Amino acid sequence: MTETLFLNARLIDPASGRNELGALLVRDGRIEAIGDGAKAAATSRADRVDLAGHLLCPGLVDMMAFKAEPAACLAGGITTVALMPDAGRPIDTDAAVEHVTGRRDGVRVLAYGAATRGLAGQEMAEMGLMHAAGAVGFSDGRRAIGDARVMRRVLSYAARFDALVVQHCEDPALANGGVMNEGATATRLGLAGIPAAAETILAEREARLTELSGGRCHLGQVTAAETLDVVRRAKARGVRLTCGVSPHHLTLNETAVGDYRTFAKLSPPLRDEADRAACAAAVADGTVDVIVSVHDPQDEEDKRLPFSEAAPGAVGAEALLALALALYHKGEADLVTVLRCLTSRPAELLGLAAGRLVEGAPADLVVIDLDAPWRIDKTALKGVTKNTPHDGLPVQGRVRRTLVAGETLYQA
Amino acid sequence: MTETADPFVFPARAMIDAPGGDPFPHKHLLGIAGLKPEEIRFLLQTANSYVEHNRQALKHKPTLAGLTQINLFFENSTRTMMSFDIAGKRLGMDTVSMTGEASSVRKGETLLDTAQTLNAMRPDVLVVRHRQSGAVALLAQKVDGAVINAGDGWHEHPTQALLDALTILRHKGRIEGLEVAICGDVAHSRVARSNIYLLNALGAYPRLVAPPTLMPAHAERLGASVHTDMAEGLDGADVVMMLRLQRERMDGAFVPSEREYFTFYGLTEDKLALAKPDALVMHPGPMNRGVEIATAVADLPGRSVVEAQVEMGVAVRMACLDVLTRHARAAKGAGQ
C-alpha cells in the first residue's frame, strides 16, 4: 500500500466549486479522502507533503492536441490528452483508435476518430466501430467538413452514440488561400486574409445543423467576437453547441505576426484585439467551454519559409496553464472558471470521469504555484520542437508537481 | 378485435352497411393510407381464400378471363412483376409486361403520354411501378382501368404491406396488439410506409429501427415509435421486418460501411434473441445476406417466413385484381 497525504493544499475542484485549504489523501493511485477526513484517514506510513498553500487541482484534460508529447504534457500539468485524428496517420478505423489509446509515459492518451473517410469530408467513416473501440469523439481535425449535408449526416449518425463532433470552425471556401486574419495588418503585409466571417458563418450553420440533428457539436477553436455571439445565442436556445479557445487566441492578437513571424501563423489565425478581449470575456461568462492547447509541433524547416508557405501551428501543452491563468492574473476571469475550462468541462464533453476531485477517482492531480513568475523560454521547452509564439513572454503560475494515478511523474 | 378461432372472421363493416354496400369502394389501389380497416380486412380475407387455391395442382381459375392486365414497370423488379403476372394469369387475364428499359419513356415520352397511349389499348388493370413518389397516382388520373401501385418511390407499396399482413395473420392468428419492429433503411422505404399505415389501421404497434441517417424526419408522426438502437427496438417484438438496404447507400453517404451496418443493424441470432422467443422474421427481398440479415437468421426454421411472404404475394395480388375488377366485370358481365 502506498499513501501520500498532501497537507496545506488549496483544494480546488471546479466541478463542485470546492475552493478551500485542506488535505487530500492518495492511496494506491486513487483519491482516498478529501478535506477534513483526509488527515484522520491517513496511516502512519503515509508520505506527508506540505504544499504550503499551493493549489491542488484535478490534472488538466486537454481535448485538442495534434501530438501527444508526454514530457511537455506533464510539465504543463496535463494528465489526459485527446489526440486529433490527423495527428499523424489518419485515425479512421477502430484498430487505429485502439492503437493510439492508452498510457504514454504515464499520460493518458485518448483519440478522436475521423468523421469522414480519409478525412476527406465526403463519406462517413466507421464512427460506430471507432466509438466502440474507445474514440472520444469525431472530427476531421484541421479540416472543416465543408459540405453541410455531410456535416448533417455526421452529426445525426454520431448522435446515435451521443458522441461529440469537433469541427474546425472555418468555412473552407471563404478561408481558402488565406494565411492570416483579414484586416489592415494583412493588407499592409500583402498577405491573403481570412475574414472572421468565415468562422462566424460556419458556427451559425453548425448551430442550425446541431439543432436539426439532435447531436452534439463542438467548435474546436473559436477566435472571433461575432462567433461567440452565435454560440451564446445557440446555448440560450438549448442547442448542444459548445466551443473551445486556444491560449494563443486568449493572449495574442494579429500584431504578433509582426514582420512575418511564422511562429504566430496559426489556424484559425490570430484576430484583432477586440476579438481577443471577446474570447477572454467569453471564458469569464461561460460561453467558452474549454481551453485547449492545440499542441501542434512543427519542424523549423516547415516554419522557416515565406509566411504564406509556412506551416500553421504552435506548441501549446507546456504553457497551457500559465497562459490560461493570465486571464485570472489580469482580472479577466476568475480562477475557478479558468480551471473549469481546463479540467472538468473538457472531461464532461468527452464523457470522461477525469477532471474532478472525487473520492475513489484515480489520483490525476496537479500542484500549482499560482503566483510564481517565470518566462516562457523556447530553449527550455520539453517538446521536440520549439515553435512557440510566446518566446520570452513573462507569465505567472507554475506547475510544481503532476501526478497520474497517484504517481508523481513531474516535479519542479 | 376479439380473438376468434378463424382469424379471418372480422367484424367486417360490410355487415353493418346496408345490404349490397360495397366492401371496397375504390377504383384504384394506390396506397394503404386512406383505406379503412374493414377494407383492408376485406382484401386480406379475399387473399386468404386464394392461398389454398394456389396450393392445388390446377391453379387456373379464370374468373377474370378476357380482361387485360398491363404490368408497367418503369423501375425494374423481376420478383414483383412476376408475382403480378402469375396472379393475373391464374385468374385467366391476358397479361402484358413492359419494363423500364423497353418503355417509351426512354425515348422521351412523358409519363402522361404513356398513360394515354396505354389507355387507348383499353387495359382493365394497370400495375405500375415508378421510381418517383406520386407518379402512379398521377398516371391513374389519366386512365379508365384500375391502377394498382406496385411501388412508387419512397411513398407506398400497398400489396407488399398486404402480403406482409397476410403472412403475419396466418402465423400469429392476429395482428391487433402485436409489436412489429421495422428495421433498416426506413427513410427510402415505401415498404415501411405502407406497413406502418396498415399495422396502425389493424391495431398493431409498429416500431421503426434505423440509424439516424436513415430515419426520416418526424417518423413518429406516421404512427410508430422511433428507435436508433436496435436492441431497444427489438426488445419484446412479435415480428421483425427487415428492410433491404441498397448497397449504394452504404458507401459513406448514409452508413459508413457494410461492416459497420451489419455490426449495429444486421439481424443476427444474438439480436433476434431480444425479440419474443416466437418472433417472426420477415424480409421483402431480395436479401443482402451478411449486410442487413445474417444467413443463419434468414434461413431460421420456424422463424423466418421469407418464403411464405413470396407465396402470400401471389394470393394478395390475385385478391387485388379480383376486387378491383368487380365493377368492370359486373358491367361487362365478364366472369359472372
Image: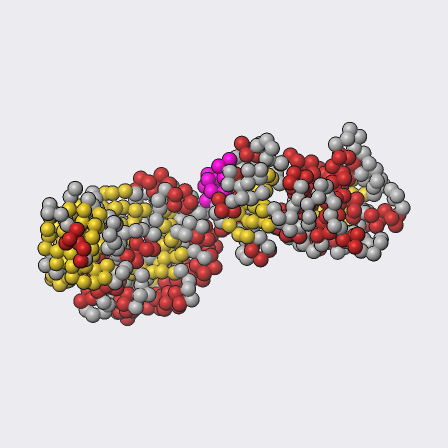
- Position of residue B109 relative to residue A193, above or below, is above
Residue A59 lies, in percent from the top left, at 22, 53
Q: Residue furthest top?
A: B57
Q: Residue at x 59, y 49 (%)?
A: B206
Residue B331 drawn in magenta: no
Which residue is pictured at 27% across the width and 42% down the height?
A102
Q: Quadrant of residue B244?
A: top right
The reply to whether residue B164 is in sight is: yes
Single out the residue that lies furthest toward the right. B333
A69 displayed left or right of A195: left
* Residue situated in front as seen by the camera: A56 or A149: A56
Check the picture and name the quadrant holding the N terminus of chain A.
top left
Q: In the rendered view, does A306 fall on the left or right side of B1?
A: left
Q: Residue at x 12, y 60 (%)?
A: A53
Q: Point out the stretch of residues depicted in magenta.
A: B256-271
Q: Main secondary structure of the magenta part?
A: helix
In the rendered image, the vertical position of residue B314 relative to residue A256, given as above or below: above
